[in-house]
Amino acid sequence: MHVMGNITIYLAFILSIYAFIVYIIGIRKQDQRFIDSGKGATMSIFILASMSLMLMFALLGTSQFQFEYVAHYTSSDLPLIYKLAALWAGNAGSLLLWTFFLAMYSAMVTFSKKMKRNPMTPYITSILLLNIMFFYFILCFVTQPFALLETVPVEGRGLNPMLQDPGMVFHPVTLYLGYVGLAVPFAFAIASLILKNMDAFWIQMTRRWTIIAWAFLTLGNVIGGYWAYTELGWGGYWAWDPVENASFMPWLTVTAYLHSVMIQERKNMLKIWNLSLIILSYALTLFGTFLVRSGVLTSVHAFGETNLGAYFLVFMAFMVLFSMYLLMSRYHLIKRDTGQFEAYVSKESSFLINNLILLGGTFAIFWGTVFPLVSEAVRGTKVTVGVPFFNTVMSPILLSLLFIMAVCPLIAWQRASFKNIKDNFLVPAFISLAVAIVIVVMGIREAYPVLGFTLITFMIVTHLVEFIRGTRARRQVTKEIVPVALFRLMIRSRRRYGGYIVHLGIALIAFGIVGANFDVERMETLAIGDSMTIGDYTLTYHQLGQRNEGVNESVFASLGIDKNGRDLGYIYPERVFYLNWEEPSTEVAVRSTLREDLYVVLSGWEEDKRATFQVKINPLVQWIWLGSFVLILGTVFAIWGGRYGQIYPRYTGPKRRVY
Amino acid sequence: MVRRHWIWLVCLLLCLMMPTYSHVKSQDTYTINSPEVKDIASHLAMEGHSEHDLATCTTMQRYYEEIADMLNEGFDKQDILADYEAMYGEQGFREPNKTGFSLLAWTLPFIALGAGTTAFVIRVMRQVKGHRVVDKDKEGQEEDKSQNSTEDDIMKALIEEEKRHYL
């Protein structure tokens, strides 16, 4: 197995070099035979990457502790699902998964039906192969997944209990699919720069790729948040941790890109901007990997201190410099035939403002994340930049983003008149104002929450107005009944209405985020039979018990819940003691409703069964998960092919003999 | 005279009772569950334990209790934060100072955003001025057209659909 595993990796590394070279020769000589050989090698790399992955899964699943990785991250008592999920618990395994995804995407692009007889294919695959070569170099020479131990341990060290959660089975996979997925539009962008093909072809071809990558990034972030909420026990879903920031930054830049490409497609504007955005997004995925694997910043997510970060930094610098050189050298070509702004207020300008805010947010997060390093380098003082900083800086930025999201859909292309603005915004503005007054009357006086709820209402209403206007306009022409008109309207314009559903999802998430600020927390030590009151809830401590969960032991408490005199049953927070892990893990008990979550943590207990509980009431948190679901629903709706998604753009760039 | 003595006596008693009363009262006022304690704690790095779980992190709990005690002793938020700053310096906090070099952390994102907005405004102004030479009739036509972008899009989609269906 050791030999087989290493062969799959070394052979794939050699093949990636081979494929890259034959592609370059094929492109230079315009000889299809070289290109075909490169394509074959690309498919072989994917097969080898799949074999490596399967082998690793087999080793993890069967507890082959002679392998360093298996011994380090699993134990024989671990449930099978977590044995397999240990693949992404450490550096070598997660990079193996990353490489597999890269190989998979490369094979998909190379052999895609859409890419048949497309002269860009060899260029795109070469760029992707450059990435694959780098990752295989790391797997061959820096961190080897199939390394053997000198002495075989009887038992493995086990998996960190915090990672033994269903969230952790999906969070890294979705995040990696998003990260790696961004390499595809990047490769298309670079290929179009090399080919001096300055139209929107690459953008149209990569639309679905980019949205899929963005959707996976979204899912990765949301699942990560859910995992943090239920598993970490600190009652929050987001802590502005450097690693969380690392995955949020490319999400913001890709969101900006997805909006600005619409302007290029429709108005032939912002070509340099779009190229820069996709290069930046790709660079940020490498930066994130550097952050997680370098150990330069402290994080609960990081893989610990290794020298891997330096390699990623060098590779990132190389790719960014290479891209910037290409961008600069093609600057005069890109500038030619670029569209212009025609008015101060238009959809184009509102999209660009949205981009500015998103990039401003990205910069703020980047700056906050690296500031401890900057401060240490300049002054020798490593300061902490945590939640208070990010909340203060990001709140106005994100509120402005909500405002622009509300305004953007209703502003006309090219030029918006005063009448247009008045007609579209009068009703939403009145409704939002009414909501603001109700909120203030209800007793919420802090500026940000009032502003937040008002803007969310404004955003939801402006979007609903768009649905209503669209349906009405369609009915005037087709005389269909309302549900049919609405359904057909949305189906015929999936991208537009999918985007609006995504916006509504974001509004729901924002609703949850603003609401979560009104949390209340209480920590109390109770004897059996004692009660504690928090908000409308009274919790009565009934029992402290112990049970076996496989080889692990768990201590749990049962508490009766009473809300305003109504019996709501029991809740069971627990602490699990793992055989191979010193620290017990916290299993939070959550009773969720759309209004609020009752969140109970068993903090500790005494011999006389007195126990300490941390209890929180987190208002509106469920809206965050509900909004995420709506967001993904909108994304799927926007990219779902149907009859209207089967039309591919035509390549109009320079002629080439090889494909 | 007797009345004046009584007044003095009552004042003296009140003065004597006040520290005791405020002490007793404040003892009952702040606990680790008080929002004030949570607010102050949210600023502290707590030796790197600030991201931990209050329910299980003893260091964090120690800080919470310490803050509650200080509040009960009559210190206010600023006094307590100043006390921690004297002990640990800027490194004791979860956010950089708003003075000196650290001010850059707070201001640079907004400076960058301001610079970006300025560049955007200048660019749009230049391009819009270039377009102002377009005659007013054309402008009027475009304005009317732009007012109904949703309707236009729907009409276009319907025409496309018809074309696909019949051609």
Image (cartoon, rainbow, N blue to C red):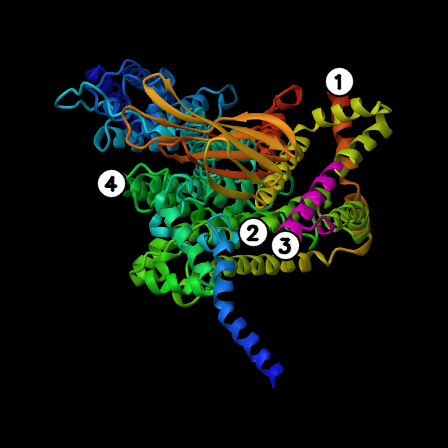
Q: Which residue is mark 1?
A: B165
Q: Distance of mark 4 from mark 3, alpha carbons?
A: 46 Å
Residue type beneath disc 4:
Asn
- Which label sits on residue A446? 3
Residue A461 inside the magenta-drawn segment: yes
Q: Quadrant of the N terminus of chain A?
A: top left
Residue reaching furthest to the left? A150
Q: Distance of mark 1 from mark 2, alpha carbons?
A: 50 Å
Whether residue B164 is visible here, answered yes or no, is yes
Residue type beneath disc 2:
Ser
Which of the two labelled residues, at mark 4 and mark 3, occupies the earlier sequence position? 4
Q: Which residue is mark 4?
A: A307
Kind of element beneath mark 4: loop
Query: Which label lies toward us, 4 or 2?
Result: 2
Q: Please tell me how crowded label 2 is: few (under 14), some (14-19), or many (20+) other residues with Cα within 10 Å.
A: some
Contact? badges 4 and 3 (CB < 8 Å): no
Contact? badges 4 and 2 (CB < 8 Å): no
